[in-house]
Image: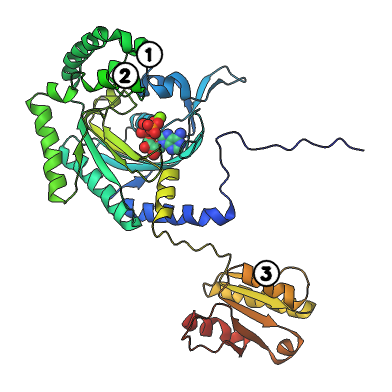
Amino acid sequence: MTQQFEKVRALTGMKDVLPHESAAWETLEAIVREWLASYGYRNMRTPVLEHTRLFARGIGEVTDIVEKEMYSFRDALNDDHLTMRPEFTAGMVRAAIEHNLLYDRPQRVYCMGPVFRHERPQRGRYRQFHQIDVEALGFAGPDVDAELIVMLARLWKRLGLQDIRLELNSLGQPAERAAHRQALVEHLEKHIDVLDEEARRRMHTNPLRVLDTKNPAMQDMANSAPRLFDFLGAESLAHFEGVCARLQDAGIEYTLNPRLVRGLDYYNLTVFEWVTDRLGAQGTVCGGGRYDGLMELLGGKPAPAVGFAIGMERLLDLWQQSEAETDTSECDIYVVHQGEDAQRRAAILAESLRDAGHRVLVHAGSTGFKSQFKRADASGATVALIIGPDELAAGQASVKWLRMEEGDTRPQQETLPFDAIAETLKTRM
Ligand code: ATP
Ligand code: MG
C-alpha cells in the first residue's frame, strides 16, 4: 500500500479566489481599467520580486513594512537578497528610472496585482492581497493631486459605494518636517514614561510614526503632540489650499486629519486616505499622497510624483455590501442531448453559437435528460437547447427558456431549425 500523502493547504493569510467568487473580481477589474483609461492612465507590469534594498531604501528602514512585514529571502542559487513586493510604488519608480520613462514627458501609469506582507491575518488583512496602484510621475502641481482624488470619487460613485469618506493632510517639505521633528522628539522625551517599547525605539528614528499608535495609553500624549500641519510654510500651505479648492470645485467633502501620516517614509505635502466604518477595524480602502523625493532617493533624476493604492479585497468587500450585481453564471446556453449522434451535432451547433457571440456549454457525458436539466439549471444558463433523436432527425432543436419572468411573452418552449437558432436567440436573450 502506498503511504497516504498528507493534504497540502494554502499558506496562512493567502486566499484562493474560487470560481463563484471570481466574477466579482473580473467585473471590478474591468470597471477599474475602463475608469483608469478615461483619465489617460496606462497599465504597466513590474516584477513580483525585487532586490530587498529597493524597498529598504524606497519605503524606509524604520517602517512597519520594512521592519517586520516583508517576505525577504536569500536566493539559494546566487545568494541575492530578494523581497516579494510589499507595495507597487518603489518598483514602478525603479522601472521609470531604469527605462528613462520621464525622458520627454510625465507619465500617468498604473499596476494591478498581488502584493505580500507578513501580517497577522484577519478580515481585510491578508498576507497576499491585491492592490490597484496608480501613479502620476513627473507632475508637481496640486491640480494632479486633486485630479487623483476626484478620480477616486468617480470610482466610488460608479461602484455605488456608500459611507466612504476622505481624510486629508499635508506633511509639508523636508525642512518643515525637520523643524517639527525636533519639537516632536522633545515632546516624546517629556512623556517618555507613557511610551511603549516600540515608541521608545522609534522616537529618534521615526517619531512621526509614534503618533500613529493605536495604544490607548499613548492617546493623550499623541493628541497633545505638536502638529506637523502647524509647521508648514507659505508654499506648502498654498499647495494644500490648491488641492482643497479643487476638491471644493468638484463638490468633494473632506476632513483635515492632522494625525494622518501614512506608513511609508517617502511622502511629502499631500497625503490622503479614503476610509469607511463598514469594514470593521480595517477601514482604509485607499491611501495615497505625494512623494517628490523618491525618484532622487532611488538614484534617478529628481522628479515630483503623486499616487495612491487601493486595497482590492477591502474594496470588493465594501462593494458587495452595496448593489454589486455580478453575473456568476457559467454560460448563457446549455445544450442537452440524447445519443451519440445528437451529442456530436450538439458540439457542432455549439461552435456556431459561439461564433455568434454566445457563451455555450454542451453537456459532457451521457446521462438521462433529467440530470442534464439539473446541470443546465445549476449552470445559470438562461436557455437550454434540447437535441433528442426526433429533433436530430428533423434538423431541429427545442429551445427552452429556463428563467422566465412574470409577464414574459416569449414562448417558453419552441422548436427551431439548427441554422436559425443563433439569430433567433440573439433577438430574444
Ligand atoms: P493599514 O494601516 O491598514 O495597515 P497601510 O497603511 O499599511 O494600511 P498601504 O501601504 O497604504 O496600507 O496600502 C494601501 C491599501 O492596501 C490600504 O489602504 C488597504 O486598503 C490595503 N492593505 C494594506 N495592507 C493590507 C493587507 N495586509 N491586507 C489587505 N489589504 C491591505
Ligand atoms: Mg500596514
Cβ atoms under marks 1 and 2 closer than 8 Å: yes
Q: Which residue is mark 3?
A: 375
Cβ atoms under marks 3 and 1 closer than 8 Å: no
Mark 2: secondary structure: helix
The answer to whether 274 appears left or right of 348 in the picture is left
Residue 153 in view: yes
Q: Which residue is mark 1?
A: 196
x and y percentages locating residue 91 in the rendered image: 40, 31
Q: Amino acid at mark 1?
A: Asp
Q: Which residue is mark 2?
A: 218
Q: Residue at x 24, y 25 (%)?
A: 302
x and y percentages locating residue 39 in the rendered image: 27, 51
Foreground mark, 3 or 2, reads: 2
Q: Amino acid at mark 2?
A: Met
Mark before the other along the chain sequence, 3 or 1: 1
State the separation of the CA atoms marked 1 and 2: 8 Å
Mark 3: secondary structure: helix
Residue 195, quarter of picture:
top left
